[in-house]
Image (tube, rainbow, N blue to C red):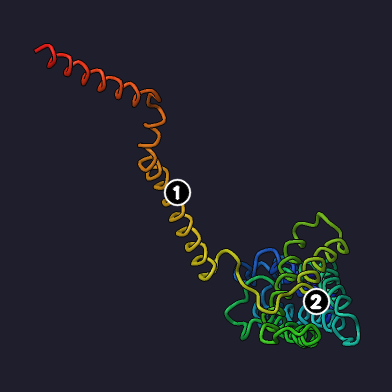
Amino acid sequence: MANASRMTSYQRREQLLTIGRSLFAAKGFEAVSVEEIAASAKVSKPIVYEHFGGKEGLYAVVVDREMRALNDALTNALADPQSHPRQLVERTALALLTYIEENTEGFQVLVRDSPSTDPVGSFNSLLGDVSMRVEEILDESFKNQHLPAKGVPYYAQMLVGMTVFTGQYWADQRKVGKEQLAAHIVNLAWYGLSRLEAKPELRFESGKAKKALQRRKDKQAKEASRHDNEPRSNAAANAAPDHDDDADPNADSTLDAATAEAARSTAANQDME
């Protein structure tokens, strides 16, 4: 407690904010107590209440600071509407990753579940604002490519969500550098956007695709059944000719000779009688 007298009010406030941010990032809002914050700062609980009114007040200030820092970074990245769309995508990806690199704990606080006392979910609100700005950029790009504008809000959400969740993964798994990861994000986002179809469809899993597949299967089954029946019919039709081919070619002449011989024999008998 003697340490408290050696700090100004501003210094103590900043110390509590730094400690609170680290604890909220590591454990989440619900798991952190005022007692733990005070113990980590080596002050009494009343000091925490004096500066922030409680854990909720401290958390609110931490979130507000991180929100402003991230908002400024993303807003500046999207500020120049005259820039090439790909350049805006690159700037935005780098801006987010730079913020994560420099404010890892702050980012972890933002992406954790908000407490019930948080009125609107500040981070989600920020992402909504960023998505609206991305919509404005995409709207112009869609017009230039003659694509329907009704898909713009969804593509904006996809781009922002893809970038944020990739950044969240990178915050814990930094196996590639910031610029390399930004290049991967841009590679997927840009080449996907540059090849959009005006009327995209699911090629395999849609109801329409499954019905078409079933029709093809039914047709193939009918053709297979017809082919299976054809050999048996042909065999029956050709059975007699095949049998004649195997017969003795001298059978008819032999039969005629035998008949003639029988007639001569009958006549000879009659003469003898």
Give how far across and how far down residue 196 sits, in percent: 73, 74
Give how far across and how far down residue 140 sits, in percent: 80, 87
Q: Residue at x 35, y 24 (%)?
A: 253
> In 3D space, how far apart are the residues under numbered discs 1 and 2 (Cα atoms)?
89 Å
Element at label 1: helix
Q: Residue at x 77, y 66 (%)?
A: 188
Q: Earlier in the sequence, mark 1 or mark 2?
A: 2
Residue 30 in sight from this viewpoint: yes
How busy is the neighbourhood of tag 2: few (under 14 within 10 Å), some, or many (20 plus)? Answer: many
Q: Using the image as rendered, state which of residue 227 and residue 258 is in the foreground.
A: 258
Element at label 2: helix
Q: Is residue 211 above or below residue 122?
A: above
Disc 1 to disc 2: CB gap under 8 Å:
no
- Residue hosting label 1: 227
Q: Residue furthest top?
A: 272
**Quarter of the rendering containing residue 34:** bottom right
| Residue 12 badge | 2
Q: Amino acid at mark 1?
A: His
**Which image quarter holds the N terminus?**
bottom right
Q: Using the image as rendered, state which of residue 240 and residue 149 is in the foreground.
A: 240
Q: Nearer the viewer, mark 1 or mark 2?
A: 1
Give how far across and how far down residue 109 sits, in percent: 71, 71
Q: Using the image as rendered, state which of residue 210 and residue 249 is in the foreground.
A: 249
